[in-house]
Amino acid sequence: MDNEKKSGSGFWTGFLTACIIFLFIGCIVLSIRIFFNTTGGSGLSGKESKQVSEKADSGSVLSDPAVVNKIGELEYIIDKEYIDSVSNDQLSEGIYRGIMDSLGDPYAQYYNSEEWVKMQEETQGIYYGIGAYLLKDQDYLYPRITGVIKNTPAEEAGLKKDDIIIEVEGEDVYDQNLDDVVDRIRGEEGTSVHLTIMRGEAGNREEMEFDVARRKVETPTVAYEMKANDIGYIQIAQFDTVTVGQFSEALEAVKKEGAKGLIIDLRDNPGGSLKAVVDIAGMILPKGKVVYTEDKYGRQEVYESDGKHELDIPLAVLVNGNSASASEILSGAIKDYEKGTIIGTTTYGKGIVQQIFKLSGDEAVKLTVSHYYTPKGNDIHKVGVKPDIEVEFDRDAYLENEYDNQLEKAMEVVSDELGVEYESVSTNEAKATEDTAPTEAPTDAPTEAPEH
């Protein structure tokens, strides 16, 4: 999922608007996600620390005189000749990052203390901010609000979609890096941020000022609605800690509204938390394996569904080339159990697991530790999950009329399983069809640098 490019296909209109940088201004842009586990505790255990020390004393790179001497040479040259000043902290951090880069693992990463705090916020899906989506406006070069989350400080303060933020705490933010603007808008719970915005059409804009409270905001990762023929439709943007509860609520809601069939949309879902996807799979699958992992020593860890909440209605799952990792776990398991019909295009093919290890000093590292396999033992890494029914997304039809041919195929399949006729929305009718999904939501197709 890391470095994954998004197709920007328009079916995310509403819940996943293409090319919006997801910025909960508490706001972490949900640009790139990984399937991972996180070790607990506050650093290595005493036994592990001893092993690290023993490693350093017995032939590791840390004890190689040539390496130590080379580092000394580099420090001397930098100190004597480099035009700018560099702190020891900068050099040390560079060494740590260099070690991780040397692995050749595209998912390996070192997190300094600030990055580690933000990483934890991302995986929890909860932030301290105002609850709005931002995009750097390419015409004005100021942040533009592309959506306001319901029941958040942004909504309560009166901020609206298309407001352009021109100042944060009195500082002009023209053409500033979106990361930096977000960092200033975010802050401690209970504090507030002063924003100056421009509202209205060009030539008739009004400057307005707002003091907006900062508080805990939960990332909306799930959206749902009822469609024709009593078919429920649930989109999952990614798998965060909060996604489990949101999916459960969505599933119960469509059932209460009389859903006799279900479509789960995993298109452009880059993955996320292992625990979250296993818990969600437990609301769909029969008793048995959901996924298992295997490390370099051949050790396996199996994750299972207890089968107590198995879904008992016809199901279709939408996927595409940007459905990765945790999305592939769910779609792969559903396919193995023949629990639903997979529709779309072959998924991304990320079948490896990253683990985060906490270091001393509120720092951490992430690296790949194992492969994962579907219940039937399929390794999908660099292969992906092949759909049962392959349907290429018709981008032109969507851009012209908002006609989603993949979703239409899913509606046909589920309707057929229900034994009812489905009258497909034509490309001419699609434009006029009202979309009842939320009007704004995160996307993993950022047009700016990711906000972490």
Image (cartoon, rainbow, N blue to C red):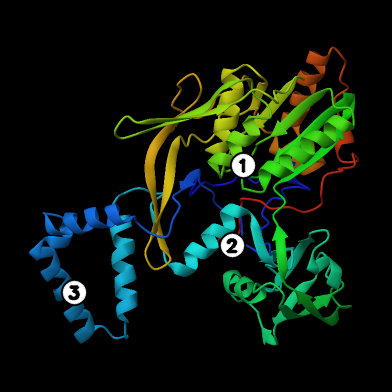
In the displayed structure, 23 sits above or below 436; it is: below
Q: x and y percent of residue 323 in the render?
A: 58, 37
Residue tagged 2: 448
Is residue 10 visible in this depiction of the protein?
A: no
Q: x and y percent of residue 255 in the render?
A: 84, 30
Residue tagged 3: 74
Q: Could you say which is closer to the camera, residue 226 or residue 255?
A: 255
Identify the residue at the far top of this view: 419
Q: In the shown orientation, is residue 151 left or right of residue 50?
A: right
Given the image, on which type of amino acid does mark 2 rest? Glu
Q: Which quadrant of the view contains residue 129?
A: bottom right
- Say few, some or many: other residues with alpha carbon within 10 Å of mark 3 (under 14 / 14 to 19 / 20 or more): few
Q: Could you say which is closer to the camera, residue 64 or residue 307?
A: 307
Q: Nearer the viewer, mark 2 or mark 1?
A: 1
Q: Secondary structure at mark 3?
A: helix
In the displayed structure, 169 sits above or below 412; it is: below
Q: CA–CA distance between discs 1 and 3?
A: 43 Å
For image coordinates 27% across by 57% down, the residue present is 49
Q: Secondary structure at mark 1?
A: loop
Q: Quadrant of the C terminus?
A: bottom right
Q: CA–CA distance between discs 3 and 2?
A: 35 Å
Given the image, on which type of amino acid does mark 3 rest? Leu
Given the image, on which type of amino acid does mark 1 rest? Asn
For image coordinates 84% across by 38% down, the residue present is 225
Q: x and y percent of residue 415 in the render?
A: 82, 19
- Which mark is drawn over residue 269? 1
Q: Earlier in the sequence, mark 2 or mark 1?
A: 1
- Say few, some or many: other residues with alpha carbon within 10 Å of mark 2 (under 14 / 14 to 19 / 20 or more): some
Q: In the shown orientation, is residue 264 left or right of residue 203?
A: left
Q: Earlier in the sequence, mark 3 or mark 2?
A: 3
